[in-house]
Image (cartoon, rainbow, N blue to C red):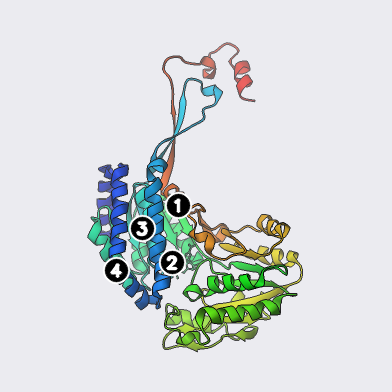
């Protein structure tokens, strides 16, 4: 579409002015973004409340505060990340020095989903700015209030030829993808991720795909059950289960299943109250379509706890379903809601095989005190990232690059990983002109013999 191609052309021209390559310019932009987020905290909280009924606590911890912390960390280290790095040089290259220059790609498109509509749009923006790119954000159409606050906030502090927000749904996203971009950073579902990669392939544009899937959570017989119950309930029911790395389903050892579930029920009541549907701070389901999809799973297995819903307010109680098998409909796709199916196991091999029969998960959680069991699961199962004896918390560390593997995603970000994602690593050899080692040339006497001394 005309308007998008003209916006991208403007950004490309701005990129060519080389202003974004100046690290002080980037630092100033990051600081401006940080101040604007702080100044807009109230309107962001109101928007997140309107779009998803997020409480102020959730809005701050998982969206606003998270992004402020990513900004603080990036501002602190950017000068050292952005500097060219001297690396070793092999003896065959005597006389020369080797360097890696991180350089920005140019114009980056960031496509964001609705579940953490502010954080998942702004965290990649921080990486894009830090690395010296121009950027266009396409936020989710399912969280219109947050997208509007985001658009206004960005519009106030950046000219559109540098950073722009383009609102719209699927057609807008596709129109942007038709253009020649320099980088595409997509967070969303697996099916749409495939379409993004197809569109990117037409222009050979590099991509990061932050996708989803079913993330298992294993509770072994020797786990600290009280703590496991609390950490799993928190990771699962935060944002009403609409978290890409929420424990999707439980594998619980049969010897401790009932003791664990008892603890789980108690801790869920402590966290969200006896009647979570009356808790004014319990996040709602994003749309009626998603609500109906989740409601269709209630007849799976046996209802252990929860099960009540409020269609008018689009809320669903924290719910646990037991006696589940892989044949149940709830086990077919990522759940993305406050329903937790429970499979039981006797032997860890069953667990590993069960997971191996399905696409590689975005996250995996294992609760056990036994180091050998931890190592067995960590070495045998491939997954994006995860925790031992916790859930979700790995996401919040700037030292742990976050991303998927296989169908759960390509690439990673957060902390330095965010800067690296939006930078091309340009390798450069600086050669001496003071002398010239002759062996590489084809006309040197006994050249091959000499070369073989070095290349063996
Ligand atoms: P989605 O894939 O439906 O939409 C994501 C974005 O893509 C939106 O901005 C949407 O407008 C756009 N889009 C939708 N269809 C498109 C199409 N055909 N062509 C081009 N663009 C299109 O995802 P969602 O429902 O917003 O988010 C939920 C999904 O995102 C879940 O699968 C979840 O696991 C995943 N997710 C992953 C992460 C992660 O970090 N890995 C984080 C959050 C959510």
- Residue occupying the point 49% across, 76% down: 240
Front position in the image: 18 or 375: 375
Q: Is residue 82 visible?
A: yes
Mark 3 or mark 2: whose residue is earlier in sequence: 2
Mark-to-mark CA distance, 2 and 4: 17 Å
Q: Is residue 324 left or right of residue 11?
A: right
Mark-to-mark CA distance, 4 and 1: 25 Å
Q: Position of residue 67 (x, y in %)?
A: 39, 60
- Residue occupying the point 51% across, 20% down: 94
Mark 2 or mark 4: whose residue is earlier in sequence: 2
Compared with residue 91, is residue 18 higher up or lower down, i.e. above or below?
below
Q: Is residue 325 visible?
A: no
- Residue occupying the point 51% across, 76% down: 337
Mark 3 or 2, closer to the camera = 2
The residue pinned by badge 3 equals 178
The residue pinned by badge 4 equals 149
């Amino acid at each position: 579409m005309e308007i998008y191609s003209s916006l991208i052309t403007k950004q490309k021209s701005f990129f060519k002015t080389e202003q974004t390559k100046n690290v002080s310019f980037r630092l100033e932009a990051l600081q401006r973004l940080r101040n604007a987020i702080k100044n807009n905290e109230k309107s962001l909280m109101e928007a997140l409340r309107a779009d998803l009924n997020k409480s102020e606590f959730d809005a701050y911890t998982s969206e606003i505060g998270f992004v402020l912390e990513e900004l603080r960390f990036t501002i602190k280290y950017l000068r050292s990340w952005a500097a060219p790095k001297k690396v070793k040089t092999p003896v065959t290259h005597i006389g020369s020095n080797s360097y890696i220059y991180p350089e920005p790609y140019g114009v980056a498109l960031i496509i964001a989903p609705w579940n953490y509509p502010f954080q998942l749009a702004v965290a990649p923006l921080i990486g894009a700015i830090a690395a010296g790119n121009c950027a266009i954000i396409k936020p989710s159409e399912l969280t219109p209030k947050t997208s509007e606050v985001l658009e206004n906030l960005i519009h106030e502090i950046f000219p559109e030829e540098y950073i722009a927000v383009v609102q719209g749904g699927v057609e807008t996203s596709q129109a942007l993808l038709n253009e020649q971009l320099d980088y595409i950073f997509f967070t969303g579902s697996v099916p749409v991720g495939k379409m993004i990669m197809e569109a990117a392939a037409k222009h050979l544009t590099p991509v990061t795909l932050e996708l989803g899937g079913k993330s298992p959570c294993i509770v072994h017989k020797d786990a600290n059950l009280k703590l496991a119950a609390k950490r799993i309930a928190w990771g699962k029911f935060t944002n009403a289960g609409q978290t890409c790395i929420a424990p999707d389903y439980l594998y619980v050892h049969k010897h401790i299943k009932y003791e664990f579930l008892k603890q789980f029920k108690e801790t869920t009541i402590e966290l969200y109250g006896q009647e979570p549907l009356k808790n004014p701070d319990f996040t709602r389901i994003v749309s009626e379509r998603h609500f109906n999809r989740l409601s269709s799973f209630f007849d799976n297995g046996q209802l252990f706890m929860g099960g009540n819903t409020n269609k008018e307010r689009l809320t669903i109680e924290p719910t646990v379903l037991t006696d589940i098998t892989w044949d149940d409909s709830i086990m077919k796709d990522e759940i993305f809601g406050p329903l937790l199916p429970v499979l039981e196991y006797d032997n860890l091999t069953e667990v590993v095989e069960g997971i191996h029969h399905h696409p590689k998960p975005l996250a995996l959680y294992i609760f056990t005190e036994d180091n050998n069991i931890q190592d067995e699961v960590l070495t045998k199962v491939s997954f994006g990232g995860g925790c031992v004896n916790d859930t979700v918390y790995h996401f919040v560390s700037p030292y742990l690059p976050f991303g998927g593997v296989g169908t759960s995603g390509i690439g990673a970000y957060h902390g330095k990983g965010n800067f690296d994602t939006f930078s091309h690593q340009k390798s450069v050899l600086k050669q001496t002109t003071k002398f010239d080692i002759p062996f590489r040339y084809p006309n040197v006497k006994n050249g091959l013999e000499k070369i073989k001394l070095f290349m063996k």
